[in-house]
Amino acid sequence: MDFFLQKLHQSSISLNMLAIHNLSFAYNTIPVLKNINFTIEPGQHIALIGASGCGKSTLLKVIYGLLQPNEGELFWKDKKLLGPLYNLVPGEENMKYLSQGFELQPFRTVAENIGQYLSNFELELKQGRVNELLEIVEMTDFAATKVENLSGGQKQRVALAKALAKKPEVLLLDEPFHNIDNFRRNSLRRNLFRYLNRNNITSITATHDKTDILSFTNETIVIRQGEIVVKKPTQELYQNPQDYYIASLFGEVNQVALSSLGHDSPDNILVYPHEISIDQNSSTTVRVKNSYFNGSHYLVEAVLDQSVFFFTHTSALKAPESVGIHIDEKALHRTLSL
Ligand SMILES: Nc1ncnc2c1ncn2[C@@H]1O[C@H](COP(=O)(O)OP(=O)(O)OP(=O)(O)O)[C@@H](O)[C@H]1O
């Protein structure tokens, strides 16, 4: 038996999972993934986040079996995944990878594309399944439309339905809602994750959008320059990111010296803009530079001790007004690890 598998058997870890052990990958000689290790229980939803070019898509491609790792092992439910060098058809049987390109057949209809790999043996069953998938991605009205006549966002929804068609056990999503307008994006996300939960499908979503992450994923993996920095329950990571890089992947964040808030401490803290409010009695004042309308609020850009600083407010503030600020107690304890 494989050494890693043997070790897992001896430990109390369930083997009913996705396990990645000491995985490294290089494009030619340029290392992109370095010593990646993690496990995922079936049915879990994982977000994969990190700066552009850190290796998210590459990791999804290695897991799916499109790229051969240089080192390391991958397992899904006790089965070792061998990679493209050992599989006649690239891509693991129980998985689906939805890439940033859609890989659809432009001259066939939406329904034909979704049903492409479904058996024609029982046509009624196939039709029922295609209809169910059309509903999930809200494309029922376009069933008979040729893919070449769809918008980018519509193609993305068809590609998603096609990826779900054969009921994969693991779904690997690369920026799945990237082209989709906000109006659809929210309902599509809810439909998709409801479907994945009902069918106990495991998912890994590479994304730059915090709304993909916060509501729908159990855990988040952060990658930086090809290495895993942290894997943690998503809410816990958002509340306590260990550094500025991680916090900034969730959106705007301030790094503030406690001394600039009048505290006798050499530490810095991370403060999200919504954790700051105006308090005219406060002795900590900031100078307003700009206010950006954000719909439900304004994002105010200000200067605190010569550093740029962002906070949310219900109305626009005018430059160069000086205002006192209050910072949530919670943020005051979010000290940066050195
Ligand atoms: N086919 C390839 N050949 C050589 N280098 C590549 C190839 N594909 C990607 N790379 C490089 O590998 C690194 C990781 O790329 P990857 O696409 O995995 O990043 P990513 O985190 O998914 O980025 P993004 O968020 O922009 O999609 C980048 O430096 C990229 O330029």
Image (tube, rainbow, N blue to C red):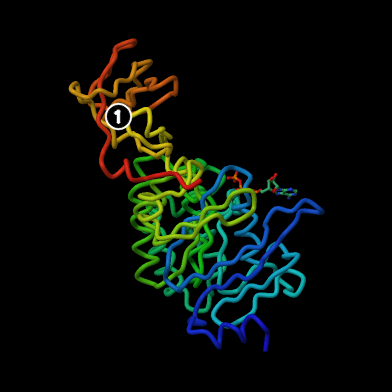
Say which residue label 1 marks: 312
Could you say whether the residue bearing mark 1 is in a helix, strand or loop? Answer: strand
Q: Position of residue 189 (x, y in %)?
A: 38, 53
Task: Farthest residue to the left: give it.
Answer: 281
Q: Position of residue 43 (x, y in %)?
A: 42, 71
Residue 4 or residue 100, whichever sits in front? 4
Say left or right for 119 vs 200. Answer: right
Relative height, residue 76 to residue 1 (above, below)? above
Residue at image position (46%, 71%) is 126
How far from the left and from the top, in percent, is residue 112? 53, 60
Residue drawn at the location 70% of the way across and 75% of the way down: 82
Residue drawn at the location 53% of the way across and 74% of the way down = 120
* In-front residue for pair 156/306: 306
The quadrant where residue 70 appears: bottom right
- Say whether residue 72 is left or right of residue 42: right
Residue 75 shows in this picture: yes
Q: Is mark 1 within 8 Å of ligand 1?
A: no
Using the rendered image of the protein, determine whether residue 154 is visible from the camera's viewpoint. Answer: no
Crowd tier of the residue under label 1, counting other residues whose Cα lies within 10 Å: few below 14, some 14–19, many 20 or above: many
Instruction: Report the residue that reaches farthest toward the right.
Output: 29
The furthest residue to the top: 320
The quadrant in which residue 262 appears is: top left
- Residue drawn 51% across and 50% down? 49
Q: Looking at the image, is 285 positioned above or below residue 267?
A: above
Q: Could you tell me which quadrant the N terminus lies in?
A: bottom right
> Taking 17 as reference, is 44 above or below it?
above
Amino acid at pointer 1: Thr
Residue 263, percent from left and from top:
33, 33
